[in-house]
Image (tube, rainbow, N blue to C red):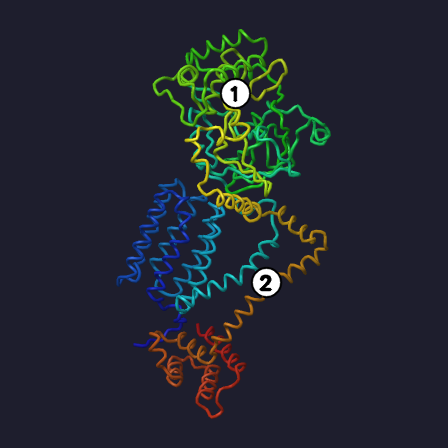
Amino acid sequence: MVMWLADPIFLRKSPPVRTQFILLLMLAWVALPLLFDLPLSVGAAFAVLLIVRVALLFTNVKKLPLWVLVLLLVATAVWVYFRIGTIIGRDASVSLLMLMIVLKAFEGETLRDWQILLLAQLILMGGGLLFNQSMLMAPWLIVALFCLISSLGLLAGINPVAAMRQGALVLILSFPLAVILFVVMPRKDTPLWGVPQPQQSSITGLSDTLDPGSISNLIPSNALAFNVTFDNDVIPRNADLYWRVMVMGDNQGGQWHAVKEQYTDEDTLQLPNRSILAQQSNSKLIGYQLIIQDDHGRIPALDQPLADSQSDLSRRVGNVVRVNKSREGLRRVHLYSQLVPYLHQRMDRSLLNYYTQLPAGLNPETRRLAQQLAKKSNSSEEFIRHILTYFRNGGFQYTLTPKRSHESLNKTDYFLFSSQEGFCEDYADATVWLARAVGVPARIVIGYQGGEYHPDDRFWQIRSKDAHAWTEIWLAEKGKWQRVDPTSAVSSVRVENGVENALPAEQRASLFSPYPLLQKYLDKGQFYWQQWVVNYDSGRQNSILDWLKLKDIPKSALLLVIAIAIIITALPLIIWLRRQSSVQAQPLTDGINLLKQAVIEGEEGQLSAIGPLELQAILAEHGLLNDNLAALMAQYIDWQYGAAGMPEKRQQRAWYRKVKQAVRRLS
């Protein structure tokens, strides 16, 4: 049965089952990274819905009723709200988008439905990049774009092999243009990836509480924390690289808690400005740039950080650096530090009380040891030396897997007098207990120490294996905090050469890649990916323009150069598209088929069987054969069957354009 319909019918046809199956596989690939970043229950719901949709594809059920889809949509929104706690924000919005797209696939029957589904998948790709901008996302994105372009070919009726060939070619020809547009598009001072950071997420793994094992549990993961480059290619000593992140000052029941990070004058540095420091021969002032994903505003900074020109940075209690607006994604931070192991401060009575408090009744043996060491000391500095000597000569061991006491709250006593095995947090905890037990203010600093230097490319990588805890002890005689790293008394190698060289051989395995050469290139690639792709901002853009000698030319000349570059890189793609159009174009056949599809509903075989005279009669029967269409039909019949034969291609293309205009008027 052939039916007349006023809407263009080619968009209402259903693609082959094989094409629909391929498009569903593409949806799985586009959603793949999100399955690792979104809650497991959301990923499970997506997987179940997708499997059900694939199963329905091979049954007689073409689409679900509208009421079923509405119920599934409501259930999806409720499920997301139940699992995440909101439907607003990055996690909830992307979760809802992903599940709504798979629900859209349930009503995928016509060509138009599947085209909309492809467009929705393109948006979902952007959602994936909000969660993860690592170098591994590049091949995923390239494959996803290749599938998208190839899928458009499949929906146009091209066979899979030809569609894949066409998709690869379009991607290759588009790449130079994409690079030029990426480089020249105006940039802000910050990358475009930033969205507010969810409160429940954790980036570095550094907690605002410190228990035995808090730091040692981070070491085996060896995950990248941040990259660093130093100004003027300075190469500092490993022993000078103390990256402070948090200060622990409050002990409750044997557990240390970070001090409240409020704006205060507590840690105002008694230092001159940078220009004066730079003129001092004994100054270790250095500038450096971090590429980092901040953990709720926490930014690692070398001792001691100085104020910089970046308005979104501030210093808080404990002389830690914070960004005022935390966001997801990598950021570029430039800081200055004076590499000195002390910090001047104005100390009042309330601060002295705060930094000497200890829980009552805990660790009595540690308190007695502190009294013994204090009796032999005439100053705070001598007391510190006695503590370090006690660790150095007491048979203590540095290990990732120390013996722990699970039966007593006196964990510091157990460490000092029973196990004598510990990691950095154990030595830092014991040192602060010993100092506070005799009324000497002390606190723990959490962060990273050292890093891995890549000499070929002159950058440092700091990983979770570099996580470290050390102490600061108040020297009342000099009015300053003194950095004291008790770990160095037990294992100086840890501070000078890194944790991987300080641990026993059996504990080092997880810190080294089994493929060091591959790891070297991956590290290098990750560094340049972060520098020039993910964190490409106005500063990087100016660097490129400066390298190309274009930074100082007039704006009009720069725009002309950019326009020429865009035209040159777009030319191969334009030529290919025009050639494809001319090779595949059959203006007369395409025009008459377009007219049939616009007014007749039926299978392809039925439409091809309708001749021009029959089509003319159908148009006349439904009152659509106006003078314009009648002239176009007469011209087609004359060219196809008249004695004059076919006209030139130029005339055929002109006729086709007129048919397209007539079809638009019909719909």
| Residue 536 placement (x, y as % from top left) | 58, 48
Q: Is residue 499 left or right of residue 70?
A: right
Which residue in the structure is indicated by mark 2? 569
Q: Is residue 631 positioned above or below 366 on the image?
A: below
Residue under the point 37% across and 44% down: 80
Q: In the rendered structure, which disc, 2 or 1, sits on the residue that comes first in sequence?
A: 1
Q: Compared with residue 14, is residue 266 higher up or lower down, i.e. above or below? A: above
The residue drawn where x is 30% and y is 58% is 64
Residue carrying label 1:
489
Q: Position of residue 125 (x, y in %)?
A: 45, 52
Residue ID at (48%, 28%): 502
Instruction: Establish if 31 lies above or below 214.
Output: below
x 42%, y 63%: residue? 151
Q: The residue tagged with tag 1: helix, strand or loop? A: helix
Q: Is residue 633 left or right of residue 15?
A: right
Query: For the residue labelled by badge 2, is the local secondary structure a helix, a strand or a loop?
Result: helix
Identify the amino acid type marked 2.
Answer: Thr
